Amino acid sequence: MAWTSPRTWTTGELVTAAIMNAHVRDNFNETVTAKVTTAGDLAYATAANALARLGIGTAGQYLMTNVGATAPAWTTPDAVGLKRTTNFGFTDNGPEQAIPFDTELFDTNELHSASANTTRITIQKAGKYLVLANCQYTIAGAHWGALSLKRNGGSYISRTLQFSNGATNLIPSVAGLFAFSQGDYVEAYVQSGNGGGVGCSAQALDTNPIVFFASFISP
């Protein structure tokens, strides 16, 4: 069935079943009321005077245009949360080191691999992402510590630097909203100076853990 442009009736015309079926029954079957079947359904145009049904998505999904840009579609947001469960030691006054992560708190679209390139969050879908990293330095004596985000192992996209007189540990966090292309990856890097023994300390999630998050915000 398809929509038929409504008939213009003439005086004295004989009304037949075929005419009524085409212009009344079939056209009603092309309306939104006839297309939807379930609570939460949406109707959208597939062409001029043509409707289709989009069933309700699952909890937490959002509505966006499909890959071919031809129709709306429900999509699960790309998001990943990583944690390191053991201390991460590195050389004081040495080069920056990317933090490897051994635990995935969540990963909706294979943004992280637990077996290869474990330092990376790899972008599967181009867009703007909120990215956050946090760690706690354990260093003896007065020192400085940096926590950075780098794109594709090269350029900084964000960096924070903290200083301590030795009385307290440093707890740097870095975050921002960044645009990525598909296939880009981002890593969290640590670096310190003047502190003797150095490392990032694995902590519980409700204290100051070594964590790394990314979440899709918009195209």
Image: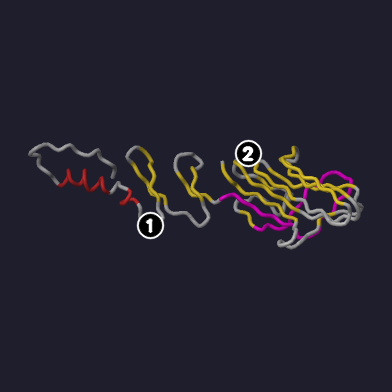
Residue flagged by tag 2: what amino acid is it? Ser
Q: Residue at x 30, y 46 (%)?
A: 30
Q: Quadrant of the N terminus?
A: top left
Q: Nearer the viewer, residue 14 or 56?
A: 56
Quick one: which residue is furthest to the left in this view?
12
Name the residue carrying label 2.
181
Answer left or right for 89 relative to 13.
right
Residue at x-position 70% and y-position 44%: 186
Quadrant hosting residue 159? top right
Callout count: 2
- Residue 208, position in %: x, y? 75, 58
Task: Please name the residue that numbered disc 1 is placed on.
Answer: 38
- Give the image location of residue 185, x and y in percent: 69, 43
Dot 1 crowding, Cα within 10 Å, few <14, some 14–19, many 20+:
few
Q: Is residue 91 magenta?
A: yes
Q: Quadrant of residue 87?
A: bottom right
In the displayed structure image, the side of residue 48 where residue 81 appears, left or right: right
Please give the name of the residue rendered at 67% of the width and 47% of the height, measured from the top-left corner. 131
Q: Is residue 19 left or right of residue 113?
A: left
Q: What are the residue bounds of the magenta stretch? A: 77-105
Q: Secondary structure at mark 1?
A: loop
